[in-house]
Image (tube, grey):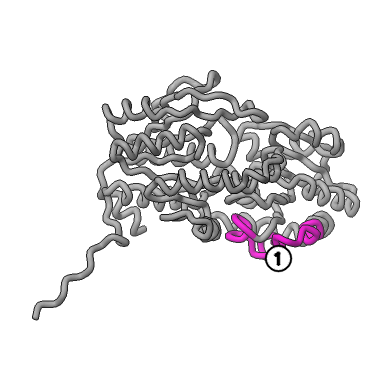
Amino acid sequence: MEVRKYLHATAPVHLAIVTETFPPEINGVAMTFGHIARELGRRHHHVTVYRPHRHDLPPANPSTGFAEVPLPGFPIPGYPQLRLGLPARGRLQRLWRRNPPDLVHVVTEGPLGASAITAARRLGLPVTSSFHTNFHAYTGDYGFAPLRRLVLAWLRRVHNRTQRTFAPTEELCAELAGLGFRDLAVLSRGVDTVRFDPARRSPALRQSWDAGPADPVVLHVGRLAPEKNYPLLFRAFDAMRAANSRCRFVIVGDGPLRARLEAAQPHCRFTGFIPRQELARHYASADIYLHASLSETFGNVLTEAMASGLAVAGFDYAAARQFVRDGVNGLRVPCDRPDDLVAAAVRLATDDALRQRLRPAARAAVEAQSWDQVISRFEHDLLTVAGHLPNPELRPAPAAPAA
């Protein structure tokens, strides 16, 4: 790969990653930057992760390939498993003045991330950011719709103070550009096809779900929160159950809606959060994956389900638009047609031949989307911003020919 040729010729650099969510927390952003930090460390870069302190963090382990610096923070109301970082400009400036990183990358736009951008700019350090969550779109889900413009203005200001903002898809980059965001680039998402593999299918786990070998198991993985469009998901579940009483439904995840959803959906099994190795076994032991959300910036769960060999259905945007070919390796419906998603779910519940045809094709569709390729591209972009690689966009114009 041309990118890797350049990178092999580049000396290791010191990268500071500032984030308000990181493993062992369980969400797409934490998972993504856990992968990135480990892989950049494995490539001999000096990576330091700055994150809010947690009492349950494991002891420092040099084998991870990166160091962690805990900073003050507090639990997010309604999400005690996540923490919001407090502003830390002064402390970060002191740390970075003594040992300046070659580049600061800010993952989240909260008080910690915003203060890190200010600290980096005051010290003259290159700084980039990434956009992962449509917080402005979530205001309506949480009863704060009048604040949408204010939240959007905050996000735009945070990101436009960095030299480059990375978003998961070209589609989202175009949307953000239309909202006034500048200097956008793509940081896609990889799939761990070793961990998420159909070979992890477990008859014993299926039996614990009261599912026989021929009973379709419908899986959903995600944060149990208002923005995930659970009313539509459970409407689809009800239609599937009415069309095929053999269907079983398993919900993996936790969040503020869990108690209410468990009470309203007694036919579903709710597992709460589970370790990623166990999550891989859950994916592989199911048959169908439904993705009803319209608010994701990517949707890692969809590609994990595909890698695990599930027949998937989702709306035509983000990961589904990038990887699902309708009727070939999954089912994809227009974003403004929720009834079509319900109909697609019923098709998957009732058409055994369709499921069996889609499942291996789903796996094949994401096998080439390795984290190695995604991180190589990101590494190249970071080193370009840091000035360690030539930037083709900034190449000087060719000299005029001699007279």
Q: Quadrant of residue 80?
A: top right
**Residue 36 vertical placement versus 292 (above, below):** above
**Residue 379 vertical placement versus 115 (above, below):** below
Q: Which amino acid type is shown beneath numbered disc 1?
A: Gly
x%, y% of residue 305?
65, 48
Decide which of 85, 329 is in the foreground and name it. Answer: 85
x%, y% of residue 5?
30, 55
Decide which of 264, 40 is in the foreground and name it. Answer: 264
x%, y% of residue 298?
58, 51
* Residue designated by label 1: 327
Report whether residue 266 is seen.
yes
Identify the element where label 1 is drawn.
loop
Confirm whether the magenta stretch covers residue 334: yes
**Residue 315 vertical placement versus 44 (above, below):** below
Residue at the spot 62% in from the left edge and 27% down from the top edge: 81
Q: Which quadrant of the rendered structure holds the N terminus?
A: bottom left
| Range of magenta residues | 317-344
Numbered marks: total = 1
Residue at the spot 82% in from the left edge and 41% down from the top edge: 211
Q: Quadrant of residue 334?
A: bottom right
Q: Residue furthest bottom?
A: 403
x%, y% of residue 240?
85, 52
Residue 67 relative to residue 111: left or right:
left
Residue 13 relative to residue 58: left or right:
left
